[in-house]
Amino acid sequence: MNPSPSASSLPPAPASPPARHFALIPAAGVGARMGGQIPKQYLPLAGQPMLLHALQRFAAHARIAHTFVVVSAEDGWIDALMTPALRQRVSILRVGGPTRQDSVFNGLNALREQLADADWVLVHDAARPGVDAALIDRLLDALAQDEVGGLLALPVVDTLKRGDGASSPRSQQTVPRAGLWAAQTPQMFPYALLHRALRQAQEQGRLGEITDDASAIEMLGLRPRLVEGSPRNLKVTLAQDAALAEFFLKGPHP
Ligand SMILES: Nc1ccn([C@@H]2O[C@H](COP(=O)(O)OP(=O)(O)OP(=O)(O)O)[C@@H](O)[C@H]2O)c(=O)n1
Ligand SMILES: C[C@](O)(CO)[C@H](O)COP(=O)(O)O
């Protein structure tokens, strides 16, 4: 009988397939604060609908395996954006929910059969049209050896005041800004971890408490890595944000 092979004679264990990176773009909002006639992600910006900028950036990025865009079930605009080339790299998920986190959670649920636990998901706001390959690479590179994940963010440089909530507010106090960061997106986490974090938040009735994906990860007691983003990656929230976003999109700017 052949002796049992020693450990050194065994072939190397098959390496687990490298984790892939997917983008998930929540684009099911209505843009109430923008005050437009149509949801802000479809308003024209630098010559094309706002959403198309982020879709094109992720679709063109060689390290992003595929991009999923979450829209509302009744969305009547997204199909007009989808060229045959874009449809090769972007899939539409008509599972938008009442809040951003609902839309993200619904999107993750819809991908249970397509994504592996260890695959990375980069969640990026459709309302941040200024994301580009350099910022995506910065996040991917910074988290290449990370087990938790992280997000693009900007250190706070302004002095922060807490207002009293009056219609003509007064400052109640200055909030120490040391160590404070303004979160941006993409926010990148392993699929299974983010899915579990959002599911747990929903089960605890706390999904409404969180406004970004990293908050759910923090609720698990984990600490997402902060990776410096850029002012050009601003979120277009109010009407006046559009001009600044357009300025950056018509760049080039540092
Ligand atoms: N129910 C929602 C709400 C928001 N979002 C998306 O989450 C991103 C960030 O949200 P925000 O800037 O707040 O967009 P809106 O919710 O559309 O804006 P508002 O709060 O002014 O209505 C946007 O790309 C938005 O489309 C979403 O997918 N589903
Ligand atoms: C996710 C986010 O862009 C990080 O700053 C932000 O929390 C989204 O907030 P919104 O009110 O849903 O736009």
Image (tube, rainbow, N blue to C red):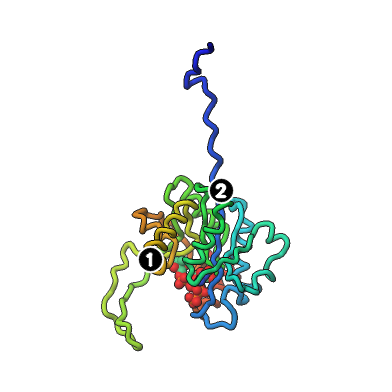
Q: Residues within 10 Å of mark 2 (few under 14, many from 20)?
A: some
Q: x, y percentage for residue 133? A: 57, 57
Q: Is residue 10 left or right of residue 181?
A: right
Q: Which mark is residue 206?
A: 1
Q: Amino acid at mark 2?
A: Arg
Q: Nearer the viewer, residue 78 or 53?
A: 78
Residue 136 placed where, x, y %? Answer: 54, 56
- Image point (38%, 68%), residue name: 209
Residue sitting at the far right: 84
Q: Which mark is residue 185?
A: none
Q: Amino acid at mark 1?
A: Arg
Q: Between 40 and 158, which is closer to the camera in this rendering?
A: 40
As measured in the structure, the alpha-carbon distance from the residue carrying label 1 to the one carrying label 2 is 29 Å
Query: Residue at position x 57%, y 61% from top?
Result: 132
Neighbour class for label 1 at 10 Å: few (<14), some, many (≥20)?
some
Q: Residue furthest left?
A: 173
Where in the figure is residue 214, as x and y percent of width and height?
42, 60
Q: Secondary structure at mark 1?
A: loop
Report whether residue 64 is seen: yes
The image quadrant of residue 205 is bottom left
Upstream in sequence: badge 1 or badge 2: 2
Vertical arrangement, residue 9 with respect to residue 216, above or below: above
Q: Residue at x 38, y 64 (%)?
A: 181
Q: Secondary structure at mark 2?
A: loop
Q: Which residue is mark 2?
A: 20
Q: What residue is rendered at 68% in x and 66% in y?
A: 82
Whether residue 135 can be seen here: no
Question: Where does residue 64 sit, x and y in percent of width and height?
Answer: 59, 53
